Image: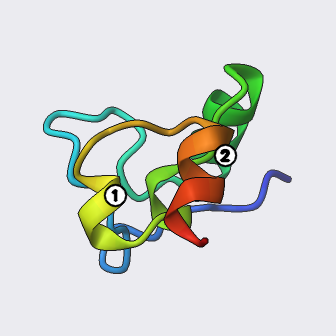
Amino acid sequence: MAKECDNKLECTCTYPGCPRHGKCCECLHYHLKNNQLPGCCFPPKVEKTYDRSFRAFIEAWR
């Protein structure tokens, strides 16, 4: 049986119409497959740029 990964109440992603909003497992798989990190890994100011790159992550936390 698959584990439910629904977390819509705590999802911090601001991308409008995201089909993975609140679905942490799907979101993580999608972004890692695309060499990115999900929006919840970034501070709010950086998350709103929709730049999910590892470079943006490193710069955000310097």
- Report the amino acid beneath label 1: Val
- Report the amino acid beneath label 2: Leu
Q: Circle 2 — which element? A: helix
Q: Residue furthest top?
A: 34
Q: Which mark is residue 21?
A: none
**If you read the primary sequence from the N terminus, does the residue marked by circle 1 or circle 2 appear first?**
2
Residue at left offset 58%, top offset 72%: 61
**Is 20 placed above or below 13 here?**
above
Q: How many marks?
A: 2
**Is 17 placed above or below 4 here?**
above
Q: Circle 1 — which element? A: helix
Looking at the picture, how far across and down is residue 16, in whole percent?
14, 38
Give whichever of 25, 39 is nearer the camera: 39
Looking at the picture, how far across and down is residue 1, in whole percent?
85, 53
* Mark toward the viewer: 1 or 2: 1
Q: Which residue is mark 1?
A: 46
The answer to whether one can see residue 13 in this image is no
Looking at the picture, how far across and down is residue 23, in whole percent?
50, 53
Residue at left offset 62%, top offset 33%: 31
Residue at left offset 35%, top offset 49%: 21
Give the colouring mode of the picture. Answer: rainbow
Q: Circle 1: is it few (<14), some (14-19), or many (20+) Cα within 10 Å?
A: some
Q: Which residue is mark 2?
A: 28
Q: Circle 2: is it few (<14), some (14-19), or many (20+) Cα within 10 Å?
A: some
Q: Residue furthest front?
A: 62
Q: CA distance from mark 1 to mark 2?
A: 18 Å
**Disc 1, disc 2: CB below 8 Å?**
no
Looking at the picture, how far across and down is residue 49, in whole percent?
26, 43
Give whichever of 20, 32 is nearer the camera: 32
Quadrant the C terminus occupies: bottom right
The answer to whether one can see residue 14 in this image is yes
